[in-house]
Structure formats: C-alpha cells, structure tokens
C-alpha cells in the first residue's frame, strides 16, 4: 500500500506534464489558411497561415531562382504584391537589397514573407526557372535585348542574364550600358555576388570602363 503513493504521484506528474505540453502546443499552433492568387497563370494556392511564401511557391512547383537560399540578400525570390500587403506590414527585411524603383513598384522578397492573409501576387518571369502546369496564361516573355556598345557587350557577357531588376535596371544589358556611362555601381549585381563582381571588375578593366 505504501508503494502506491509514489506511483500515484508520478502518474499525476506525468499527466500534468502532458497537459501542459498540449496547452503550449496549442498556443504555438496558428490555425487557418490564406490564399495566394498568382496573376501570371491564374493559379490559386491555399496555404496554412505563417507558411513562408517562397517555400510555399517552390513546393507548388514555381522554381524561383532564390540565389541566396532565403537569407534575404539576393532579391531573386522577389514577387510583386498587388493586393493583401499594407505598407505598415512591410518590414525592412522584406525589402532587403531591392532598389528604390522596385520598392515603389511593390516588389518584396518572398523569402521574408510569412502568410498572414490572402495575397494577390505577380512573379517575375525571368527568375522563375520552371512553372507548374496549371490552366491559365503565363505572362509574355521579357522584351528582347537591344544592341549594345562594344564595351557594354563585354560587361554584359559576365552578368548572369536573369534581368532580375535588383540593380535597378530593367535588364542586364541596360545595367551594362549604365556601367559604361558611369551611372551604375560596379557592385550593383546582387544576385551575382562576389564571383560576378570579380569578373565584372576584370571585364571593366579590359574594356577600359572606369568602375
Ligand atoms: S532568396 Fe535571396 S532574397 Fe530571398
């Protein structure tokens, strides 16, 4: 009989711990879901609240370039939010290295967004490596590159060619021309990082471009 007391105490303690753990789990679990409408192809995803947007897009088959892997430093995962994100909800992390022009246009880093409510977004086509098969229309191709000056062509040859807009110019060609004209900074290619900066510096030297 005397052994029953500690056994009962331990059982009570185990039940209490289980109840507390269950309570904590419930408090930490956010229930609910939100929709993401993708205007490029008309697709609509239903995601759990607090889900990371970039990961959700990738999981759904939109292979965003996302060069930095979600660290918020490359801007190649960016999406334009057309509806569902108020200015006061936008954090500095969501803007990361985006140029002022891109910020004004409504681009944000999808890797820094966790789902809070329904969103309507546009993907930047050149930075989506592959798309899921869905009914609907995918946006038109990016405009063709224009003729470049010989110096700009040398610089363009070492740029990634994703036309990601992270540098503030619509295409890598225009970024190269801006470098030649002394209007852009040599380290403006965020997605390319250090390897592209080194090659660009070398190409600028060879092309006689002051960088
Ligand atoms: S993946 Fe690089 S900024 Fe989002």
Image (cartoon, rainbow, N blue to C red):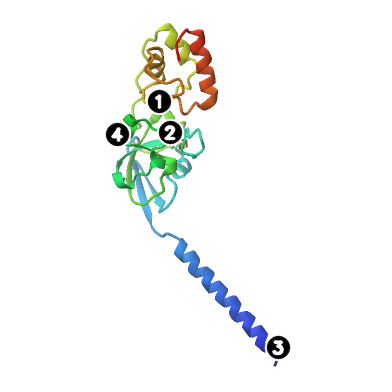
Rounded to the nearest angstrom, the CA distance separating label 2 from label 1 is 10 Å
User: Contact, CB < 8 Å: mark 3 with mark 2?
Assistant: no
Residue 169 in sight in this render:
yes
Q: Please tell me whether residue 50 is drawn above or below residue 57 in the rendered image.
A: below
Identify the residue position indicated by label 1 in the image.
Answer: 167
Disc count in the image? 4
Q: Residues within 10 Å of mark 1 (few under 14, many from 20)?
A: many
On whether ligand 1 comes within 8 Å of the CB at mark 2, the answer is: yes
Residue 84 visible in the picture: no
Quadrant containing the C terminus in the rendered view? top left
- Determine the secondary structure under disc 3: loop
Q: Quadrant of residue 138?
A: top left
Q: Earlier in the sequence, mark 3 or mark 2?
A: 3
Mark 4 in CB contact with mark 2 (< 8 angstroms): no
Horizontal relation, residue 139 to residue 66: left or right = left
For mark 4, give the secondary structure.
Answer: helix
**Of residues 182 and 190, the one drawn nearer to the viewer in this rendering:** 182
**How dense is the environment of label 3, judged by Cα within 10 Å: few (below 14), some, or many (20 and up)?**
few
Q: Which mark is residue 75?
A: 2
Q: CA distance from mark 4 to mark 3?
A: 73 Å
Q: Position of residue 206 (x, y in %)?
A: 51, 8
| Image quadrant in which the N terminus is located | bottom right
Image coordinates of residue 152 in percent, x first then y, are 42, 11
Earlier in the chain: of badge 4 and badge 3, it is: 3
Secondary structure under badge 1? loop
Label drawn at residue 210: none
- Residue behind mark 3: 3
> Dot 4 corresponds to which residue?
104
């Amino acid at each position: 009989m005397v052994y029953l007391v500690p056994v009962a105490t331990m059982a009570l303690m185990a039940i209490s711990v289980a109840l507390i753990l269950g309570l904590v789990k419930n408090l930490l679990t956010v229930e609910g879901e939100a929709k993401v409408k993708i205007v490029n192809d008309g697709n609509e995803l239903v995601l759990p609240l607090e889900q990371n947007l970039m990961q959700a897009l990738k999981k759904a088959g939109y292979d965003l370039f996302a060069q930095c892997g979600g660290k918020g430093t490359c801007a190649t995962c960016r999406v334009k939010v057309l509806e569902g994100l108020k200015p006061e909800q936008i954090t500095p992390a969501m803007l990361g290295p985006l140029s002022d022009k891109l910020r004004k246009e409504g681009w944000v880093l999808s890797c820094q967004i966790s789902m809070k409510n329904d969103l309507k977004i546009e993907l930047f086509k050149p930075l989506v490596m592959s798309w899921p098969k869905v009914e609907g229309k995918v946006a038109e191709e990016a405009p063709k590159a224009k003729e470049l000056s010989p110096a700009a062509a040398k610089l363009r040859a070492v740029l990634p060619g994703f036309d990601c807009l992270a540098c503030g110019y619509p295409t890598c060609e225009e970024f190269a021309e801006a470098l030649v004209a002394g209007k852009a900074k040599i380290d403006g290619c965020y997605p390319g990082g250090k390897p592209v900066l080194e090659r660009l510096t070398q190409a600028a030297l060879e092309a006689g471009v002051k960088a």
